[in-house]
Amino acid sequence: MLELKSLSKTYRTGDAALTGVSLQVPKGQIIGLIGPSGAGKSTLIRCVNRLVEPSSGEILLGGDNLVTLGRRDLRTQRRRIGMIFQEYALVERLTVMENVLSGRLGYVPFWRSFLRRFDAVDIQRAYQLLDRVGLLDHANKRADALSGGQRQRVGIARALAQNPELLLVDEPTASLDPKTSRQIMRLLTEICAERNLPAIVNIHDVPLARQFMQRIVGLRAGQVVFDDAPTALSEDALTRIYGAEDWDAMRKSDTEEDESESDTRRDLSEIPA
């Protein structure tokens, strides 16, 4: 289980990105982080694996406080945390297989990681993961030859190659079209269910969060202002998270997107066979 206790982050400028955030993420639960830009969603995720250093508070993963760890111990603990990025963070010139195997770099000596030499067990597991995310036939393609949705699937497989105890997912659908976004979210939730794997997902799309998340945490100005089931995400709650003006604009944007999808499907249906 992951537990955050009074987690805060204040930058040198004096800007408070997080203020006293406390959360528990039990095994197998998928939490969606929502909130306006600048609410602290990405900062929270990056504090958990200390890509951003917290100013105060505790981050407990299985009882170990990640905030107090030195560099060597932190490197070991990061094996337990899989990270999936919005912009994929793949090495474009490497193959899909090599990118997935990079998830094992924390487990091999430096010289083997430098030469990209991996055990047969790691290679076999990478093939299994590529099969699970639907990319087995693309194992030898370069990453820059893939579509956005395929790249995100590689990112998922790479994170799973670590055999993590926790997944941190930073806006996995922000660069994807609506159909691919739903496919990626469905894949993530299925994999977490299969592995009883907890996850924190920073997600900007409220309808997707409602559809796929088990629990939603709303952040505003670095503080938790909502923490409940998706069914409790009422208009009042959304206004509390986003503010009246921001939520009205987001709702209008979602409506226009749905109408655009409907128009596209109608146009395609009218094309002669």
Image: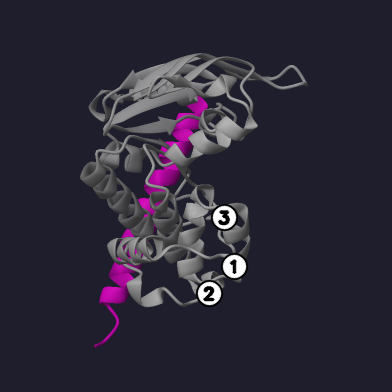
Classify mark 1: residues with Cα within 10 Å, few (<14), some (14-19) or many (20+): some
* Residues marked 3 and 1 touching at CB (< 8 Å): no
Q: Is residue 208 magenta?
A: no
Q: Can you give x and y, in whole percent of width and height, for residue 228 in the image? A: 30, 21
Q: What residue is pinned by disc 2?
A: 142
SS at mark 1 in the image? loop
Q: Is residue 160 above or below residue 17?
A: below
Residue type highlighted by circle 3: Ala
Q: Can you give x and y, in whole percent of width and height, for residue 164 in the image? A: 39, 42
Q: Residue at x 59, y 63 (%)?
A: 91
Classify mark 3: residues with Cα within 10 Å, few (<14), some (14-19) or many (20+): some
Residue at the extreme right of the image, as rendered: 13
SS at mark 2 in the image? loop
| Residue at mark 3 to residue at mark 1: CA–CA distance | 9 Å
- Start and end of the magenta stretch? 244-273
SS at mark 3 in the image? loop
Which of the numbered marks, if any, corresponds to residue 172? none
Q: Is residue 55 above or below residue 48?
A: above
68 lies left or right of 25: right
Instruction: From the viewer's side, name the closer residue of 103 and 45.
Output: 103
| Quadrant of image for the N terminus | top left
| Residue at mark 2 to residue at mark 3: CA–CA distance | 14 Å
Earlier in the chain: of badge 1 and badge 2, it is 1
Instruction: From the viewer's side, name the closer residue of 228 and 260.
Output: 228
Q: Is residue 109 above or below residue 68?
A: below
Q: What residue is pinned by disc 1?
A: 92
- Most prominent secondary structure in the magenta stretch? helix
* Residues marked 1 and 2 touching at CB (< 8 Å): yes
Classify mark 2: residues with Cα within 10 Å, few (<14), some (14-19) or many (20+): some
Q: What residue is pinned by disc 3?
A: 89
Residue type highlighted by circle 2: Arg
